[in-house]
Image: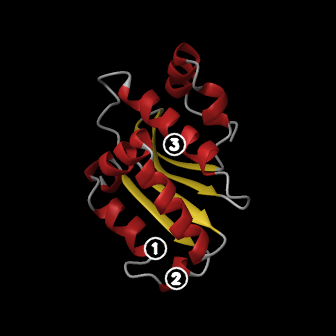
């Protein structure tokens, strides 16, 4: 993830969160107004079980968005993709035991999917993204 919008680069540099933001696997942006790109969905595919690194990156993005009143209402979807359903359960347990992570999960649209659940879960990954597009007025104008 190298091409971040200028405003995320600026705030990330000020807050010292930029290094963690650059480690995020995938951030999808939409152009909210000419030249202003807002994060729409954040995706991490964790193969090694390193939930601490993932949650540090997610919370760094949340802190970056919340640090300026112009950006605090931007609420991307957060997806954590695991290798198996067992690993998904482990992630859920670890998140529920950690105060900061639990608060992050409670205050954001946060989903944990295993690779097999991406298509088979109800609602599916695609349905969640589609609903988010329909419910974000600036994305359909």
Q: Residue 104 is drawn in which quadrant?
A: top left
Distance Cα–Cα, label 1 vs label 2:
8 Å
Query: Is there any visible trace of residue 2 in the rendered image?
Result: yes
- Helix, strand, or loop for circle 1? helix
Tag 3–tag 2 contact (CB < 8 Å): no
45 vs 87, nearest the viewer: 87
Instruction: Determine which of the numbered discs, if any, sits on residue 126 in the image.
Output: 1
Give the CA separation, mark 1 to mark 3. Answer: 21 Å
Q: Quadrant of the N terminus?
A: top right
Q: Secondary structure at mark 2?
A: helix
Q: Nearer the viewer, mark 1 or mark 2?
A: 2
Q: Which numbered marker is on residue 58?
A: 3
Relative height, residue 116 to residue 62 (above, below): below
**Residue 121, percent from left and from top:** 45, 81
- State how the image is colored: secondary structure
Q: CA distance from mark 3 to mark 2?
A: 23 Å
Q: Position of residue 55 (x, y in %)?
A: 54, 44
The residue closer to the viewer here, 141 or 43, is: 43
Using a 10 Å C-alpha cutoff, classify the residue at mark 3 as few (fewer than 14 neighbours), some (14 to 19) or many (20 or more).
many
32 lies above or below 139? above
User: Mark 3 or 2 closer to N-term?
Assistant: 3
Say above or below: 22 vs 14: below
Disc 2 crowd, CA 10 A, few/some/many (<14, 14-19, 20+): some
Q: Residue furthest top?
A: 14
Dividing the picture into quarters, in which one does residue 123 lie?
bottom left
Please tell me which of labels 1 and 2 falls first in the chain. 2
Q: Single out the mark in the foreground, 3 or 2.
A: 3
The residue that appears at 34% across and 43% down in the rendered structure is 103
Whichever of callouts 1 and 3 sits on the residue coming sooner in the sequence is: 3
Residues tagged 1 and 2 counted as in contact (Cβ below 8 A) = yes
Q: Which residue is mark 2?
A: 119
Residue occupying the point 63% across, 33% down: 20
């Amino acid at each position: 993830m190298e091409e971040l919008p200028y405003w995320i680069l600026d705030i990330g540099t000020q807050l010292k969160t930029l290094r963690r933001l650059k480690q995020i696997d995938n951030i999808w942006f939409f152009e909210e107004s000419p030249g202003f790109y807002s994060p729409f969905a954040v995706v991490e595919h964790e193969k090694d079980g390193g939930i601490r690194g993932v949650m540090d990156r997610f919370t760094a993005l949340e802190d970056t968005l919340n640090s300026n009143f112009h950006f605090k209402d931007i609420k991307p979807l957060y997806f954590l993709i695991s290798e198996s359903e067992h690993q998904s359960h482990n992630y859920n347990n670890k998140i529920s035991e950690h105060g900061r992570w639990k608060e992050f999960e409670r205050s954001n649209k946060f989903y944990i999917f295993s690779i097999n659940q991406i298509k088979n879960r109800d609602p599916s990954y695609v349905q969640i993204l589609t609903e988010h597009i329909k419910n974000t007025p600036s994305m359909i104008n």
